[in-house]
């Protein structure tokens, strides 16, 4: 009995000890569970979860011309994802996905054995749900704590959401290499297609990427990617998703990848131009993560035409000056096309190659416009009561300068024409005529007038302004010419039409500023004068174009800059050619030779897409036949006759002397 009592007490002590130990273990486990649970994110957040997605910029025709994103992701519905891709992911990543409740105990046991043998975390055994939990809520560190949190989150996700909902989130969220998050971004990045356009072999390649996006990337190693694709196809075959015939056909299919060209190659300078404005208006978080749709003003065809014309023009320029064994700086160029009525930017080329230089010469390069600035001076003169028949003596002049120096400006031709009309002086771009006109008007009022026309750059108030020596950007100059084309109304250049949120609702529409800065009559008369530049003057290389066109060449000292800015009733096109260093383009490389051919090639292709009518003539304008050189009314004996525009009551009243009058003068 004593032994029996002692045995009972011993068993009781052991039992109590075991209970206490069990309590401690359970308490510790419960404490650990509560601690881990306390640190877990709220699964309810998935109700409102919306992954960061790509903001797309569209051309006027609806084509993607650029993208903004932190993670390149374009969410799609499960129905848009091909069954082969869904099946391939399940067969490769988690075959029992539709059977388990978030954790695959078989897989965990198999992975644990491999990890023990390897002495490190080699295989995770994670289900698709666990991978989703890690991607959405946890960091990628490989620790016991993280794995336990991942498992707990997976169980919660499975209790709250259907399998298809989990798979949809996973396929839109997983990283697939090349900056692509989600299957739609990967389909576009690797194959240049929407995900719903993928074939079996393409689906298999993408399904093989989650395990090692960089390692299995076809951009990194094609052979390894093809081998991984074959592995995924074998999984599909083994699980009965495809037949032997389908497998054999797909495994032999050549790997065809889309070109590496990034989104925005159509108009990269334009995309960079509008980015800061959009960041300021929308905020960086919404712009780069919101999946917005931004409708831009760029016309796809015109942008392509402008880019090609500039490339051809620069190539021709280089060919004219190419010598053996001599490396020289490549010439650069820029093109702007504006809608004459709305100020919308229809094309923007900021250089010959965006990949090699992101500097936008259409909006960032401050260069002298040369004689392309002269129409601004003439426009102001017309506003102050001058007519195109008024005459100025084209003769040598000199102006004393500080330090005893003397400025003696010259005409480009080196000749002087004598007394000629303002129209003739503008047509042949005589420097002396413009300088004398500016002297009469005063530089300061002309500077103020130029600012009203949309030129925001600092302009120096001196007589050299007549030669276009104050630097400005090409977009400003194009904006000023837009006033001439638009009946005197300046409209702020704009690149954005509308911003839509991810549901297609309007978020923002810009309202460009506009103002009347020039009378309609003065604008029409200046246009009439600039028509003569193309018909008979420095722009006559484009005179074969049958559309109503006006424009002006520009050339700076030593041919450092060559420009042509011209317009039709519907659009304004500005072209600049030069070198970034400011060195010469070469002897005799004027605006007419280096820039005008680019402008002409552009206009030949885009004008047929615009309205064919002439510039609208105001009621107060009268057209008369005038001799260009003398400014007198034509009577059939004048040397150079044009139909010229005047405000009614300001037209010439005297006629050119006829041949009998000239003979009588000689006789007497």
Image: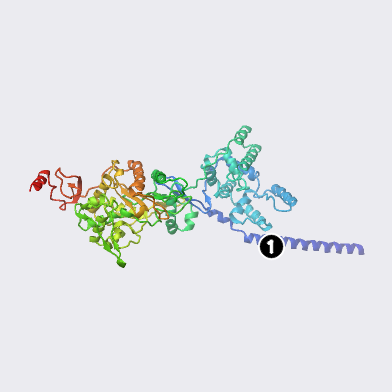
Residue 186 in view here = yes
- Is residue 12 rendered to the left or right of residue 62? right
- Which residue reaches farthest left? 668
Q: Residue furthest top?
A: 245
Q: In which quarter of the image is residue 240?
A: top right
SS label for mark 1 = helix
Is residue 524 toward the left or the right of residue 208 in the image? left
Q: Which residue in the structure is indicated by mark 1?
A: 31
In this view of the protein, which residue sits in the foreground, 587 or 141? 587
- Residue 173 in the image: state x and y as whole percent: 56, 50
Instruction: Write the residue at 36% across / 47% down.
Output: 594
Among the 4 quarters of the image, the one containing residue 490:
bottom left
Furthest toward the bottom, the residue is 403
Label 1: few (<14), some (14–19) or many (≥20) C-alpha neighbours in 10 Å: few
Residue 657: x and y, percent? 12, 47
Viewer-proximal residue among 508 and 434: 434
* Residue closest to the eye, 450 or 224: 450
Q: Position of residue 632 (x, y in %)?
A: 16, 49
- How many numbered badges does the structure rendering display? 1
> Seen in the image, is 72 located left or right of residue 385?
right
What color scheme is it?
A: rainbow
* Quadrant where the N terminus is found in the figure: bottom right
Q: Can residue 1 be seen in this view?
A: no
26 vs 227, nearest the viewer? 227
Measured along the vertical axis of the image, is residue 181 above or below residue 404?
above
Residue 573 position, x and y percent, is 34, 48
């Amino acid at each position: 009995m004593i032994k029996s009592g002692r045995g009972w007490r011993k068993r009781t002590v052991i039992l109590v000890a075991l209970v206490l130990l069990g309590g401690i273990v359970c308490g510790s486990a419960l404490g650990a569970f509560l601690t881990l649970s306390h640190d877990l994110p709220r699964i309810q957040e998935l109700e409102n979860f919306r992954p960061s997605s790509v903001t797309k910029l569209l051309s006027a025709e609806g084509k993607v011309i650029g993208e903004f994103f932190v993670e390149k992701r374009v969410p799609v519905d499960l129905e848009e994802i091909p069954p082969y891709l869904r099946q391939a992911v399940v067969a490769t990543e988690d075959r029992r996905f539709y059977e388990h409740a978030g954790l695959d105990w078989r897989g965990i046991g198999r992975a644990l054995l491999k990890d023990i043998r390897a002495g490190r975390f080699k295989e995770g055994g994670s289900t698709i749900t666990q991978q989703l939990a890690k991607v959405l809520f946890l960091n990628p560190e490989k620790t016991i704590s993280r794995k336990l949190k991942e498992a707990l989150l997976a169980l919660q996700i499975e209790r709250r959401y259907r399998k298809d909902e989990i798979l949809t989130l996973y396929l839109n969220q997983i990283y697939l290499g090349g900056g692509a998050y989600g299957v739609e971004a990967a389909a576009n990045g690797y194959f240049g297609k929407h995900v719903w356009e993928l074939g079996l072999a393409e689906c298999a390649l993408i399904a093989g990427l989650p395990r090692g996006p960089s390692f299995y990337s076809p951009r990194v190693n094609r052979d390894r990617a093809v081998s991984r694709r074959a592995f995924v196809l074998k999984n599909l075959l083994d699980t009965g998703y495809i037949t032997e015939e389908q497998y054999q056909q797909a495994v032999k299919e050549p790997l065809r990848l889309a070109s590496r060209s990034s989104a925005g190659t159509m108009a990269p300078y334009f995309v960079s131009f509008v980015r800061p404005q959009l960041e300021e208006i929308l905020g960086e978080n919404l712009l780069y993560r919101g999946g917005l749709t931004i409708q831009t003003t760029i016309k796809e065809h015109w942008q392509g035409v402008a880019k090609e014309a500039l490339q051809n023009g620069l190539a021709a320029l280089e060919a004219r000056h190419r010598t053996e064994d001599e490396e020289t700086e490549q010439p650069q160029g820029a093109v702007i096309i504006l809608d004459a009525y709305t100020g919308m930017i229809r094309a923007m080329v900021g250089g010959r190659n965006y990949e090699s230089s992101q500097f936008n010469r259409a909006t960032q390069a401050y260069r002298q416009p040369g004689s392309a600035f002269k129409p601004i001076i003439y426009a102001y003169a017309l506003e102050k009561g001058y007519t195109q028949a008024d005459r100025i003596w084209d003769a040598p002049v000199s102006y004393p300068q500080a330090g005893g120096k003397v400025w003696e400006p010259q005409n480009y031709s080196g000749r002087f024409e004598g007394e000629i009309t303002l129209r003739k002086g503008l047509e042949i771009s005589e420097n002396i005529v413009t300088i004398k006109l500016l002297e009469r008007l005063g530089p300061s009022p002309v500077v103020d007038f130029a600012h009203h026309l949309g030129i925001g750059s600092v302009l120096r108030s001196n007589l050299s302004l007549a030669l276009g020596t104050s630097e400005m950007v090409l977009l400003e100059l194009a904006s000023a010419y837009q006033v001439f084309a638009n009946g005197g109304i300046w409209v702020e250049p704009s690149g954005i039409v509308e911003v839509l949120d991810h549901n297609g609702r309007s978020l923002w529409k810009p309202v460009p500023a506009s103002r009347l800065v020039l009378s309609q009559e003065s604008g029409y008369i200046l246009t009439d004068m600039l028509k003569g530049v193309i018909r008979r003057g420095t722009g006559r290389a484009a005179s074969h174009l049958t559309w109503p066109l006006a424009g002006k060449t520009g050339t700076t000292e030593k041919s450092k800059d060559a420009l042509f800015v011209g317009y039709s009733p519907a659009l304004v096109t500005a072209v600049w050619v030069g070198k970034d260093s400011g060195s010469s383009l070469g002897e005799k490389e004027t605006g007419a030779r280096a820039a005008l051919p680019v402008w002409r090639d552009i206009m030949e292709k885009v004008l047929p897409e615009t309205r064919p009518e002439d510039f609208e003539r105001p009621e107060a304008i009268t057209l008369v036949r005038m001799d260009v050189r003398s400014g007198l009314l034509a009577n059939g004996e004048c040397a150079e006759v044009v139909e010229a525009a005047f405000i009614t009551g300001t037209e010439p009243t005297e006629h050119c002397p006829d041949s009998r009058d000239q003979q009588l003068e000689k006789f007497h």
